[in-house]
Amino acid sequence: MAEQWREQRLHTQRIYTGRAVALDVDRIRLPNGRETTREIVRHPGSVVIIPVLDEERVLLIRQFRYAVGEVLWEFPAGTLDRAAESAEACAHRELEEETGYRAGRLIRLGEFFTAPGFTDERMHVFQAEDLRPAAQQLDSDELIEVVPLTWESVYEKVRAGEIRDGKTLAALYLYALRRRA
C-alpha cells in the first residue's frame, strides 16, 4: 500500500460484541494530519460455496433475509467459527448444513472484501464438486429451500435482476473467469 495513503489508528473503543461481529470506533490520524473516527464492523471471515451438481446444474438456496426484508436467491455461505476454523473447513461444514450435500472436492476460486468501507470481512469463494447426499442440518434460526437450477436459468435470473445477493454475484463472476481460463 502506498504509505502516503495510510491512516494511523490512535485509539480503539469496542462498543459492541455479538455472536458473529463486533463494532469498533477507531480514532485515526489521516495522512494530512487531521483526526477523525471510523466505525468498523469486525468479522471473522466467511465463505460462499458454488455447489456444482454436474455440467448443466448447480444448487442455489432461497431464504428470507431480515436485513433487507426479502427472500433472496443465494449460494450457500456462512461465517468462520471464531475458534480459528479454516475457510475450507467452514465451506465443507456450511455446504452440508445448508444444502444436505457433502463435497468430494473443493476448489478455491478466490476471495474478496465484502464492504471494505465499514467492515474487515474477507469472503472466501469455493466451487464444490463430486456432491453426495448428506443430512441437512440447519441452525435453529434458518429456513432454507435448496433448489437445483440449470446454469442457463441461473444466468437468466441474473439478467432479470432476480439474483441480487452480492456474494452470489461475485462468486458467479469468479466461477465464469475460471471456466474461461
Image (spheres, rainbow, N blue to C red):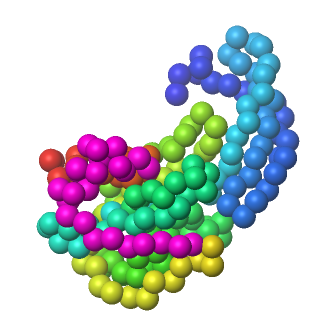
Residue 114 shows in this picture: yes
Tell me, yes or no, whether the highlighted magenta stretch contains residue 162.
yes
Please tell me whether residue 59 is drawn above or below residue 151 in the rendered image.
below
Q: Provide residue 161's location: percent of width, then percent of height.
A: 34, 44
Please tell me whether residue 125 is drawn above or below residue 180 in the rendered image.
below
Q: Provide residue 160's location: percent of width, then percent of height.
A: 28, 44
Q: How many marks?
A: 0
Residue at x 78% of width, y 28% of height: 37
Relative to residue 168, is residue 180 drawn left or right? left
Relative to residue 32, is residue 60 drawn left or right? left
Residue at x 72% of width, y 64% of height: 19
Q: Farthest residue to the top: give it.
A: 32
Residue at x 48% of width, y 58% of height: 71
| Magenta-colored span | 142-165
Tell me, yes or no, whether the highlighted magenta stretch contains residue 27.
no
Q: Quadrant of residue 21?
A: bottom right
Q: Quadrant of residue 38?
A: top right
Residue at x 79% of width, y 19% of height: 35
Q: Nearer the viewer, residue 174 or 35?
A: 174
Please tell me whether residue 45 is drawn above or below residue 4 in the rendered image.
below
Q: Provide residue 40's location: percent of width, then percent of height.
A: 70, 40
Residue 49 shows in this picture: no
Q: Provide residue 158's location: percent of width, then percent of height.
A: 29, 47
